[in-house]
Image (cartoon, rainbow, N blue to C red):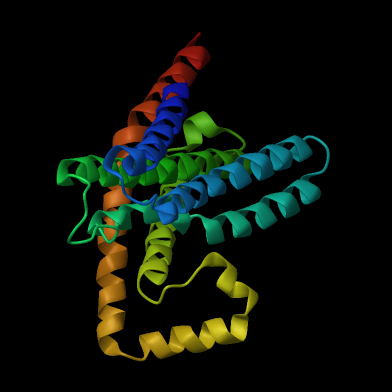
Amino acid sequence: MSSIFAATVLLNVYAALLVLLRAPLFQTKLYRPMLWNIWLSVLPVIVLAVGSLSGIILLLVSRPAAIIVLVVTAVVWLLLLPNASYLITELNFSHRRDDDRTPLWYDIILVISLAMSGVANAVVNVFIAHIVFAITIFGDAAQSLNENTSIVFVIVIMLLVSFGMYLGRYPRFNSWDLKHPVGFVRKLTGHFSERNNVLTALGFTITHAAFLALMYYLIVGPVVEGLMLVEQVRLGG
């Protein structure tokens, strides 16, 4: 399990390093939005780790207090989570100009690294939430990660994340736009008053959620199977 977290950290560092080196290597301006997006991509897991750890510790003292902490953490985390996988949208190469000095091969590996770091960040976020959900609901993570309720939880999160990515890429919403709920609702209803936008949002959400779910199964699936095997051996022994 630790290898997933270590590889994710290294992938984020590598993506950030490629962004930082791009400017001096090819005499071009530093594209700061990419660095900002990397930070926003990492932020949800920090919020989740701190809040979840606090909530789990509180479970030993006061379950109601622990539930409150976990619910608040979940809401803040869920609002921030689309920022994790949003790096996938860097694949549109919007940072490049016609007269860009940077070789295309460099930008290809740069944006792929950014995109995959976003995928890895999303997977780690959902995996931690998956474990916390299993512990909170069932009291045991190892055997309950494959429970139908836990799987539905992961699918719902993937759909919400993908819809959040759509809101960030097309209507250009940010998580903090919710500080102005009236303006948020007005802009949201105006955007979805056009039927084409509804269809685009539906297609975007389903395809991206399916992709993230497949990546989650690819990365986390073997870990869950290993945890279940260890638990079976322990119980058998």
Residue situated in front as seen by the camera: 193 or 177: 177
Residue 137 seen in render: no
Taking the image as shown, residue 135 lies to the left or right of residue 192, namely right
**Quadrant where the N terminus lies?**
top left
Residue 22, placed above or below residue 226: below
Residue 194 seen in render: yes
Residue 200, placed above or below residue 3: below
**Residue 50 image-quadrant placement:** top right
At 49% from the left edge and 37% from the top edge, which residue is drawn?
A: 144
**How many labels were placed on the picture?**
0
* Percent x, y of residue 30: 39, 49
* Percent x, y of residue 187: 47, 86
Taking the image as shown, residue 38 lies to the left or right of residue 59, namely left
Q: Residue furthest right?
A: 61
* Percent x, y of residue 25: 30, 37
Q: Residue furthest top?
A: 237
Residue situated in front as seen by the camera: 170 or 236: 170
Residue 28, placed above or below residue 50: below
* Percent x, y of residue 118: 38, 46
At 46% from the left edge and 31% from the top edge, which residue is drawn?
A: 9
**Residue 180 image-quadrant placement:** bottom right
At 42% from the left edge and 90% from the top edge, which residue is drawn?
A: 190
**Residue 3 image-quadrant placement:** top left
